[in-house]
Image (cartoon, rainbow, N blue to C red):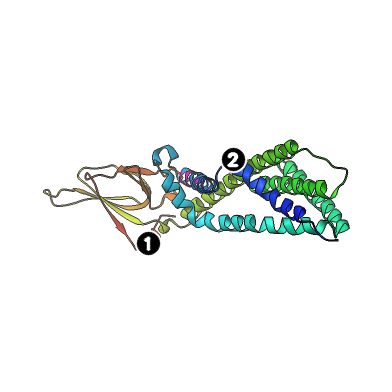
């Protein structure tokens, strides 16, 4: 059985309408930038919070968050955009094959329905604590289930002669589906970003030498405290800087401040992050060579 031109055009128009709905919600460029900024903000705030620095002190900008997420989000975003480009072609092929392979398409609809229901049930069970899943897998299961169910329903409406859905109902279905999927995507991104932030903080704990070693020169005593910090008075009374502090590692330079950690902070339960002004009152030296500190057991 041949496929009519109207049917082929309708297959492509399905995704065109879906993209039109998405474009009304958010433009693609804004969407990509927002995802990168959101991922970078959640990851950075989680990591620095685990290291003892509150996010309100960081003063990181939109560009800072985006740059901190590029290496971690670029590959998933490329994969997502490639899938979005391939999806209309696959959908068009499925619709064109529906009239010739009606039985196979009906079986595929049943499989999609079972898979969608199973994914939604698994996500809901994990939300209620009845099923153990990674935190990021919960919104993923819900999103996958919703997408598969909605797509299976759209295929059923195409192959079924008894299903009649008005254009207004179709537009409402697409809008609700797009909004729900966007919410679940943000939830997934948030969970993944928090996981990445906690892993990065754990890496700094297990390897304090990964941060640049820092030496501070000050005109007066700073009374810096922390396991591994050493204060050395300099002998020259006419020197601009009279005290030297070693045993520190640079965590971040932001908001006109240097955020530092004691060299042995990972083994000291009372260790605190240190914030110093980034101005001419202090001189800081950073070492490109990174080595683990000698900390007491």
What residue would you read off at disc 2?
A: 24
Q: Foreground residue, 100 or 123?
A: 100
Q: Residue 142's x, y, as percent?
A: 71, 45
Q: Residue 167's x, y, as percent?
A: 74, 39
Number of marks: 2
Q: Residue 145's x, y, as percent?
A: 74, 47
Tell me how far mark 1 sits from mark 2, CA to CA.
Answer: 50 Å
In the displayed structure, does residue 225 sit left or right of residue 242? right
Q: Residue 72's x, y, as percent?
A: 52, 55
- Residue extending farthest left: 238
Q: Which residues are magenta?
A: 44-48
Using a 10 Å C-alpha cutoff, classify the residue at mark 2 as few (fewer than 14 neighbours), some (14 to 19) or many (20 or more): few
Q: Foreground residue, 199 or 45?
A: 45
What residue would you read off at disc 1?
A: 290
In the displayed structure, does residue 128 sit left or right of residue 296? right
Dot in front, 1 or 2: 2
Q: Give the mark nearer the N terminus: 1 vs 2.
A: 2
Q: Is residue 133 visible?
A: no
């Amino acid at each position: 059985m041949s496929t009519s031109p109207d049917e082929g055009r309708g297959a492509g128009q399905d995704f065109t309408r879906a993209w039109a709905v998405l474009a009304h919600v958010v433009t693609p460029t804004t969407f990509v930038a927002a995802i990168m900024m959101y991922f970078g903000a959640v990851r950075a705030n989680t990591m620095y919070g685990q290291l003892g620095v509150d996010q309100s002190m960081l003063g990181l900008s939109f560009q800072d968050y985006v740059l901190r997420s590029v290496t971690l989000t670029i590959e998933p975003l490329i994969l997502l955009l490639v899938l979005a480009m391939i999806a209309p072609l696959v959908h068009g092929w499925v619709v064109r094959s529906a009239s010739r392979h009606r039985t196979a398409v009906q079986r595929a609809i049943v499989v999609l329905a079972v898979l969608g229901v199973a994914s939604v049930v698994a996500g809901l069970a994990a939300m209620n604590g009845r099923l153990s899943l990674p935190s990021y897998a919960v919104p993923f299961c819900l999103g996958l289930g919703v997408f598969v169910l909605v797509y299976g329903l759209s295929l059923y409406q195409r192959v079924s002669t008894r299903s009649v859905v008005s254009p207004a109902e179709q537009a409402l279905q697409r809008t609700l589906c797009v909004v729900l999927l966007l919410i679940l995507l943000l939830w997934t991104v948030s969970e993944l970003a928090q996981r990445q932030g906690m892993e990065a903080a754990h890496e700094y704990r297990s390897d304090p030498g990964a941060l640049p070693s820092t030496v501070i020169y000050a005109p007066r005593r700073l009374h810096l405290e922390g396991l591994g910090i050493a204060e050395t008075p300099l002998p020259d009374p006419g020197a601009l800087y009279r005290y030297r502090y070693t045993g520190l590692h640079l965590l971040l330079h932001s908001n006109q401040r240097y955020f530092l950690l004691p060299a042995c902070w990972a083994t000291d339960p009372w260790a605190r992050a240190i914030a110093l002004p980034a101005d001419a009152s202090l001189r800081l030296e950073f070492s490109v060579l990174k080595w683990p500190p000698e900390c007491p057991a």
